[in-house]
Image (cartoon, grey):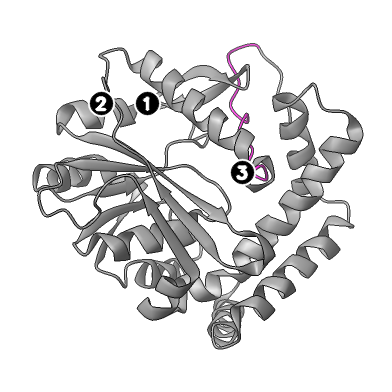
């Protein structure tokens, strides 16, 4: 756990890296990820466990290949926070290709929940979509336990006119923002525990999945638009993909809506399995009586 001095040294390093050419920093992160993958660790075991559960049809060689590439992507994503947190608007515009099926600058955009799935480029995608909207946008986040780092990260993430909202304070704030026609970004594909959740399949494995997204959409009411960040090959930056609004959502069945959310995510994961956030313990919470995986 970083102390105050360690926090400011780490942030200072990120600010320094933001001054260097992106390709150099990306290659450094890639190499560091390769090196760390050679060392046995609990996170490496989590990655292999998740891949074994979600892709039982893969042989050991395929799982090892994807796990190694993912670890490099994951470590790279932390190094590249240098640009995502401290890069200028011009830097973000140069690094992120925006591929949107909606007009992000539409002044008549209805109340909208921007649902971001946790691929390794979600940080870059969140900053880019907030910049592209050209309006104040709410952004839910999970606070860091380190208060100094949390404050610095919140300021960095909110520098393009984002209203940062801690998940612990989110429900009323989200409804207020949506009713004011202020878009809200949130992620709902991680294991946040049993509260406001249901067990629905994710690659055939019961996964503790939030049902609150559908209820927020119904209460506002608001449309759901998925966005995804992709790391481009050859150290060329990122692609922000924004999809059309979901039809017939919410359906009135929270469990069915959570199942739909996971099904959409599965389709996206299959297009770039090495870039989904497998270092997260997605199946940490188990149904009553089931043993843990980790």
Q: Position of residue 253 (x, y in %)?
A: 31, 12
* Residue range (magenta): 276-289
Q: Is residue 236 above or below residue 20?
A: above
Q: Which mark is residue 196?
A: 1
Q: Is residue 155 above or below residue 102?
A: below
Few, some or many C-alpha atoms within 10 Å of disc 3 (few <14, some 14-19, many ≥20)? many
Give the label, 3 or 2, closer to the camera: 3
Asked where in the image residue 157 lies, by quadrant, the reply is bottom left
Q: Position of residue 200 (x, y in %)?
A: 51, 17
Asked where in the image residue 252 lies, by quadrant, the reply is top left
Few, some or many C-alpha atoms within 10 Å of disc 1 (few <14, some 14-19, many ≥20)? some
Q: Label 3, label 2: how many angstroms apart (C-alpha)?
A: 26 Å
Q: Earlier in the sequence, mark 3 or mark 2?
A: 2
Between 182 and 170, the residue placed more toward the observer is: 182
Q: Disc 2 designates what residue?
A: 215
Give the label, 1 or 2, closer to the camera: 2
Q: Label 1, label 3: how many angstroms apart (C-alpha)?
A: 24 Å
Image quarter hosting the N terminus:
bottom right
Who's the residue at 58% across and 27% down the image?
285
Who's the residue at 74% across and 40% down the image?
46
Image position of 68 (left or right of 186): right
- The secondary structure making up most of the magenta span is loop
Give the secondary structure at mark 2. helix
Between 25 and 175, the residue placed more toward the observer is: 25
Who's the residue at 16% across and 48% down the image?
177
Image position of 51 (left or right of 188): right
Labels 1 and 2 touching (C-beta < 8 A): yes
Q: Earlier in the sequence, mark 1 or mark 3?
A: 1
């Amino acid at each position: 756990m970083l102390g105050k001095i360690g926090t400011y040294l780490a942030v200072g390093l990120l600010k320094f890296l933001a001054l260097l050419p992106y390709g150099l920093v990306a290659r450094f992160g890639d190499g560091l990820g390769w090196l760390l993958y050679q060392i046995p660790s609990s996170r490496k075991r989590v990655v292999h466990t998740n891949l074994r559960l979600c892709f039982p049809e893969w042989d050991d060689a395929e799982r090892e290949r994807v796990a190694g590439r993912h670890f490099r992507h994951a470590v790279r994503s932390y190094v590249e926070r240098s640009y995502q947190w401290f890069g200028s608007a011009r830097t973000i515009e140069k690094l992120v290709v925006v591929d949107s099926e909606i007009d992000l600058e539409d002044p008549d955009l209805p109340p909208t929940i921007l649902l971001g799935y946790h691929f390794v480029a979600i940080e870059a995608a969140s900053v880019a979509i907030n910049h592209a909207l050209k309006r104040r946008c709410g952004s839910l986040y999970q606070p860091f336990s380190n208060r100094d780092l949390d404050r610095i990260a919140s300021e960095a993430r909110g520098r393009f006119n984002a209203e940062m909202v801690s998940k612990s304070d989110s429900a009323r704030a989200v409804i207020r923002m949506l009713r004011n026609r202020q878009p809200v970004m949130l992620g709902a594909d991680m294991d946040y525990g049993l509260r406001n959740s249901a067990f629905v399949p994710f690659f055939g494995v019961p996964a503790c999945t939030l049902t609150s997204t559908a209820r927020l959409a119904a209460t506002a009411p608001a449309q759901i638009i998925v966005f995804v960040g992709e790391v481009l090959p050859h150290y060329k930056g990122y692609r922000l993909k924004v999809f059309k609004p979901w039809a017939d959502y919410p359906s009135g069945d929270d469990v069915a809506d959570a199942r739909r959310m996971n099904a959409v995510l599965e389709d996206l994961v299959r297009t770039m399995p090495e870039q989904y956030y497998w270092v997260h313990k997605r199946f940490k919470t188990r149904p009553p009586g089931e043993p843990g995986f980790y």
